[in-house]
Amino acid sequence: MRNIRNFCIIAHIDHGKSTLADRLLEYTNTISKRDMQAQALDNMDLERERGITIKSHAIQMRYIHPADGVEYIFNLIDTPGHVDFSYEVSRSIAACEGALLLVDASQGIQAQTISNLYLAVDHNLEIIPIVNKVDMPSANVEEVQDQIIDLIGCKREEIISASGRTGIGIPEILAAVIDRIPAPQGDESAPLQTMIFDSMFNSYRGVIAYVRIMNGTLKKGDKIKFYNTGKEVIAEEVGLLRMGMFESPQISAGDVGYVITGIKVSREIKVGDTITHLARPCESPVKGFEEVKPMVFAGLYPLDTDDFSALRDSLEKLQLNDASLVFEPETSMALGFGFRCGFLGMLHLEIVTERLSREFDQDIITTVPNVTYFATNSKGIRREVHQPSELPEPNHLEKAEEPYIYAQIITKPDYIGNIMKLCLDKRGILIKQHYLTPTRLEIVFHLPLAEIVFDFYDQLKSSTRGYASFDYSLLDYRETDLVCLDIKLNGEQVDALSALVHRSKAEYMGRRMCEKLKELLPRQQFQIIIQGAIGAKVIARETISALRKDVTAKCYGGDISRKRKLLDKQKEGKKKMKQFGSVEVPQEAFLKVLKLND
C-alpha cells in the first residue's frame, strides 16, 4: 500500500486538465502511441464535441521511479472544470489523498480554481501547484506563481512549470506525486469499509459501482451489504480501472476499483454509500462528500404520455452516472405526467436533456426553470408552489414568499462595478464587502434564488471574464409580489412556457420571450400571434406573418377580377387553416427561449 498514490487534477475550465492527463498516460505507457487520441479519458461524444469534461474519469497508471527503481501505482481521477459539475469534483476529492492544482500561465487563478482548492483543503489533501501552458507566447509565469503563493502560501520552488501540449515538466510532476502525496492510510485486515464515489449502468451487467477501499479487502464472491440501503448481495466481479475494467481476484485498502453485483434496479445503489462485509460489518460508514445543492428546477415531460415509465427508467440510469441530478414525479394540466428535476445550473440542464435524447432516445419537453415558492390564500392556508398552475388566483392570494440566498462572490477588484450592477439588477441587497488579499475581494449579497436561476452564472462569468467564484446557501423565505406570466400562441396557452416572476420583471420577461419565440418558431401557412399575458391583461405581443404562396403565378395577363378571385379564395383557406392549425413548439426552441440574454 505504501507504493499507491491516489490523486485528482483540479482546475478552472479550459486550463488544460485533460491534455495534461493525456501526457501522464503517454509518459507512463498506460496508452500506446498508436491508441492515443486527444482527451483520451473523455469518452462521451458530448465531451469531445464541446471540448469540456462532464464526468470525472478514474484510471490506474504504473510508474517506475527512476531514482530508486521502485514501481508505484497511481490512481488518477480527471475532473470537470465547469462550475455546473462541481459535484463531480467533490466526489473525486473524497476518494484521493492529493490534488494537482493546475493554473493556466496566461489566465492566472480563476473562479473554479479557488472553489475547487477550498474543497481540496477541507478534505486535507496534499496540494501540488502546477503552472500549465508555460510554452504559450502569452504566458506570464512569474505573476501566476506570485498569485499561487498568495493563495496557498507555498514556496516558489514547490511550483512546477509544465505544458500539457509539449510534455514539459511531466517527469517533475510524477516525482512530486511520489514524494509529496502521502500513501493511503488503511488496514487490510480491518472490517471492509468501501466508499462508492461513482457508478454507471450496463444493460448486460447491471449497476457497476466505482469504489475507493478505505479499510479491509474485497474479494470476488464475498457477501456484502450496502450500509444505507441495507441491500445484501454477492460481489460477482471486482477489479481495477485501467483504460478499461481490469478484473482482479481482490482489491484491498488504498485501491480504487470497481464492483459488479448484478443489481439491475438503480435505486438500490446510491453514490456516497458505504459497502461492507455481511458477516463482519464496519462500525461506521465513510464520511462522504457534500450533499448536492440543486440550483435550477425544471419539469421534464415525455412528448408522448405513454413514454412516462421509459423516461423514469432513463432518468434513474442517468442518475447513476450523474449523481447531482435529482428528480421527483409531478403532473401538469397540459403536459400530463412528468418529472420535476433539480440541476446545478443551465449547462447541466442542457447536458442532461441532450444525454436523454442521445443515449436513451427520449423525446422530451422541458418547462421553464423555476424555484419553490410559498403562497398563502385568503383562507390563511400556506402551501408550496412548484409550478405556475398551483398559484392561487390574484383575488384569492393573500401573500407569496420566495426563497432568498446568502450569496458569496470572490473576484478581482477590477470587476466590482460589473458585479454590483448585475446583483442590484437582480434585486440583490448588499450586505458586506472586504478584501481577502490586495487582489481578491469578497462581496456578500442577499439575492432572490429565482433571479439566479436563468442566466446569473453566465452573466457573472462574462462580466468578470470568468474570474468570479460564486457560492451560496439558502437563507430564508421573504414576502414578494409574484405574478404568473403566460405565453399564448394564437390565443392558446403554452403550459411549458408559463413562469412565476416578480411583477417588476414581468413586462421585460414577457417581451423578451415573445421576441425570442418570433425568431425560433418556424413560419406556417397562417399567421401566428405570440402574446405574453398576466391573467387577462396582454403585456407583450409579436406576430409571425404567414408564408405566402404565389397563387396568381398561373395567370398570364387576363382580367384583374380573375386574380382577385384567386387571392380571396386563398384568404378564405388561410382563415380556415388558422382555425384548425396548431403551432408546434420545437424542443430546441424551449431551451433557447430560456437563455434570454444570448
Image (spheres, grey):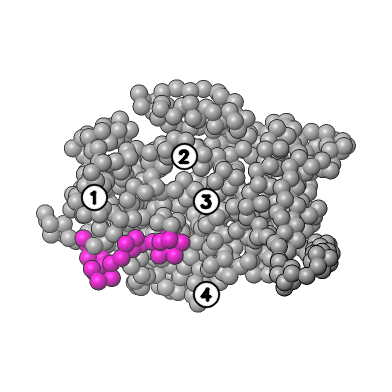
The residue that mark 1 highlights is: 163
Q: Which residues are magenta?
A: 27-49
- Residue occupying image coordinates x 12% and y 57%: 66
Q: Secondary structure at mark 2?
A: helix
Q: Is residue 303 left or right of 457 when viewed as pictured?
A: right
Residue type at mark 3? Leu
Residue beneath disc 3: 347
Can residue 6 be seen in the rendering of this structure? no
Tell me if residue 374 is in the magenta stretch. no
Mark 4 residue crowding within 10 angstroms, few (<14) / some (14–19) / many (20+):
few
Residue contact between numbered discs 2 and 4, judged by CB atoms under 8 Å: no
The earlier-in-sequence mark between 4 and 3 is: 4
Distance, label 4 to label 3, CA atoms, is 27 Å
Q: Is residue 238 above or below residue 511?
A: below
Q: Secondary structure at mark 4?
A: loop
**Residue 461 bears which disc, if any?**
2
Tell me the crowding category of disc 1: few under 14, some 14 to 19, or many 20 or more residues within 10 angstroms, Cα based: many
Q: At x 54% / y 36%, what residue is drawn?
A: 472
Q: Nearer the viewer, residue 592 or 33?
A: 592
Closer to the camera, 140 or 518? Answer: 518
Q: Name the image quarter holding the N terminus.
A: bottom left
Q: Residues within 10 Å of mark 2 (few under 14, many from 20)?
A: some
Q: Which numbered marker is on residue 203?
A: 4
Contact (Cβ within 8 Å) of mark 3 with mark 1: no
Q: Position of residue 328 (x, y in %)?
A: 66, 56
Q: Tell which circle, 3 or 2, labels the residue nearer the N-terminal end.
A: 3
Secondary structure at badge 1 equals loop
